[in-house]
Image (cartoon, rainbow, N blue to C red):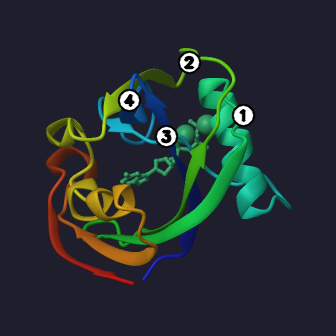
């Protein structure tokens, strides 16, 4: 078993013309490139989970939320590398302006009934519907060898 690396992930919501929407970013570089993803990343030294989430969201989208709450913790295992990732997931809401495209992400709002699951991490299909329903939970996702390229979860568990 390798060492655990911590990451944050922020899912941003708004109500637009009467419809509930989720902000996703098309990742332009690094881990998850070519997939629609929430915003987040690795911790700076000494940073709290919440500070990391807010900093990464602003760096990658230009957005600062009025409200943000912790909602989920996800653990990822990867069969080939033995790498362990722990992702702290927040729900954020209340934005003054529109998100901007950055070096890392091209943002787009999606209606919550039209999430592009086929172009996302496979694990999202298992937990994002519960997240959209407002649940809090912990999840474990065991990725097949080839992790990013194969994008196949072989086993998973999601518990309240
Ligand atoms: P750089 O490129 O150094 O600025 P940084 O933004 O610090 O990177 P990054 O983007 O590599 O970190 O972090 C990975 C991001 O992807 C985090 O927000 C967590 C998220 N993430 C990782 N695995 C995921 C998965 N299987 N499903 C998912 N989001 C995942 O939905
Ligand atoms: Na990132
Ligand atoms: Na980043």
Q: Are marks 3 and 2 in contact (CB under 8 Å)?
A: no
Residue 153 sits above or below residue 97 on the image:
below
Work out how far the residue at label 4 is from the one at label 2, CA to CA, in angstroms: 31 Å
Identify the residue position indicated by label 2 in the image: 103
| Residue 33 in view (yes/no) | no
Kind of element beneath mark 3: strand
Residue 72 sits above or below residue 20 on the image:
below
Q: Which mark sits nearer the N-terminus, 3 or 4?
A: 3
Question: With 80 as the anchor, is 76 left or right in this view?
Answer: right
Please tell me which residue is depicted at 53% across the width and 15% down the height of the picture.
101
Work out how far the residue at label 3 is from the one at label 2, CA to CA, in angstroms: 22 Å
Q: Which mark sits nearer the N-terminus, 4 or 2?
A: 4
Work out how far the residue at label 2 is from the one at label 1, CA to CA, in angstroms: 18 Å
Q: Which mark sits nearer the N-terminus, 3 or 2?
A: 3
Other-residue count near label 2 (Cα within 10 Å), few / some / many at <14 / 14–19 / ≥20 = few
Q: Which mark sits nearer the N-terminus, 1 or 3?
A: 3
Identify the residue position indicated by label 3 in the image: 13
Q: Is mark 4 within 8 Å of ligand 1?
A: no
Question: Which tag is nearer the camera, tag 4 or tag 2?
Answer: 4
Q: Which mark sits nearer the N-terminus, 2 or 1?
A: 1
Please tell me which residue is depicted at 45% across the width and 42% down the height of the picture.
38
Identify the residue position indicated by label 4 in the image: 18
Please tell me which residue is depicted at 31% across the width and 65% down the height of the picture.
130
Quadrant holding the C terminus: bottom left
Work out how far the residue at label 1 is from the one at label 4, CA to CA, in angstroms: 22 Å
x and y percent of residue 115 in the render?
24, 38
| Residue 135 in view (yes/no) | yes
Q: Which mark is residue 3?
A: none
Kind of element beneath mark 2: loop
């Amino acid at each position: 078993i390798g060492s655990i690396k911590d990451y944050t992930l922020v899912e941003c919501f708004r109500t637009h013309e009467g419809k509930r929407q989720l902000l996703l970013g098309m990742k332009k570089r690094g881990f998850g490139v070519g997939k629609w993803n929430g915003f987040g990343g690795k911790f700076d030294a000494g940073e709290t989970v919440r500070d990391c989430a807010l900093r990464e969201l602003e760096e990658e989208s230009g957005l600062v939320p009025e409200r943000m709450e912790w909602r989920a913790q996800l653990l990822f295992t990867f069969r080939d590398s033995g790498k362990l990732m722990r992702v702290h997931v927040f729900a954020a809401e209340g934005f003054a302006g529109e998100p901007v495209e950055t070096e890392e992400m091209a943002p787009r709002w999606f209606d919550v009934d039209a999430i592009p699951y086929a172009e996302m991490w496979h694990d999202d299909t298992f937990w994002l519907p519960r997240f959209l329903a407002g649940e809090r939970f912990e999840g474990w996702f065991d990725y097949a060898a080839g992790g990013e390229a194969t994008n196949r979860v072989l086993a998973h568990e999601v518990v309240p």
